[in-house]
Image: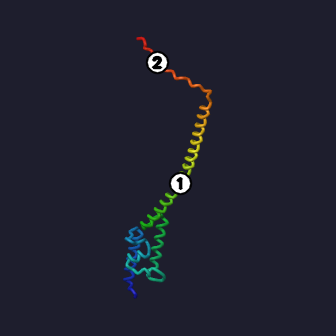
């Protein structure tokens, strides 16, 4: 079905208006910043954007403008921006987790070494006490209690 020149101009105006909205970040619910959403928002058949169809040049323009925005660090689709932010956050959390696991392993090794040293020291103390008790050369002196005699006033 052929359309008139006036209808084509009207369609192009709707497509350009929808293109501007999408590139500003006004993404409709359930949509993305893509050709499918552009066609739906402009009420135009999506196939009209491909090949030698009448609006292929507008698809090229849309993709070029979208690429320029992305190169400038602007992502018009809030979901895409959220995905990128979450990817960065996941990578950061993975790094933190790896560092925490390394630290946990080091602390576990330190704890094992400390317990081994304490056990060895305890055994040495028991051994020394036993050898002191076995050697009866040590004479224990009685404890002397000192009493204070009343002071002169």
Q: Quadrant of residue 5?
A: bottom left
In percent of the image, x 46 and y 78: which residue is there?
57
Pair 1/2: label in front: 2
Residue 28 rendering spot, x and y as whole percentages: 37, 71
Mark drawn on residue 101 = 1
Q: Nearer the viewer, residue 122 or 129?
A: 129
- Please tell me whether mark 1 sits on a helix, a strand or a loop: helix
Q: Earlier in the sequence, mark 1 or mark 2?
A: 1
Question: Which residue lies at the image location 48% right of the left edge and 82% below the top edge?
Answer: 51
The Cα atoms of the two marked residues, 1 and 2, are separated by 63 Å
Which residue does the numbered mark 2 point to in the structure image? 147
Along the horizontal axis of the image, is 116 left or right of 26? right
Picture coordinates of residue 146, whole percent (x, y)? 48, 19
Between 140 and 34, the residue placed more toward the observer is 140
State the mark number for residue 123: none
Q: Is residue 51 left or right of residue 18?
A: right
Measured as percent of width and height from the top left, residue 112 is found at: 56, 47
Q: Please tell me whether residue 131 is drawn above or below residue 55 in the rendered image.
A: above
Q: Residues within 10 Å of mark 2 (few under 14, many from 20)?
A: few
Asked if the residue at tag 2 contacts the one at tag 1, i.e. Cβ–Cβ closer than 8 Å, the answer is no
Residue positioned 57% across, 39% down in the render: 122
Task: Residue at 59% x, 41% y: name it.
Answer: 120
The C terminus is located in which quarter? top left
* Vertical placement of residue 7 versus 114, above or below: below
């Amino acid at each position: 079905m052929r359309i008139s020149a006036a209808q084509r101009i009207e369609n192009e105006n709707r497509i350009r208006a929808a293109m501007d909205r999408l590139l500003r970040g006004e993404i409709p619910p359930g949509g993305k910043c893509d050709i499918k959403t552009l066609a739906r928002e402009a009420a135009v058949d999506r196939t009209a954007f491909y090949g030698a169809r009448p609006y292929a040049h507008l698809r090229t323009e849309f993709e070029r403008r979208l690429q320029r925005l992305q190169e400038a660090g602007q992502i018009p689709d809030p979901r895409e921006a959220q995905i990128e932010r979450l990817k960065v956050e996941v990578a950061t959390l993975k790094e933190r987790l790896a560092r925490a696991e390394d630290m946990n392993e080091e602390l576990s090794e330190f704890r094992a070494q400390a317990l081994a040293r304490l056990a060895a020291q305890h055994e040495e103390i028991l051994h020394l006490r036993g050898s002191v008790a076995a050697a009866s050369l040590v004479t224990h002196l009685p404890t002397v209690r000192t009493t204070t005699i009343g002071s002169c006033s």
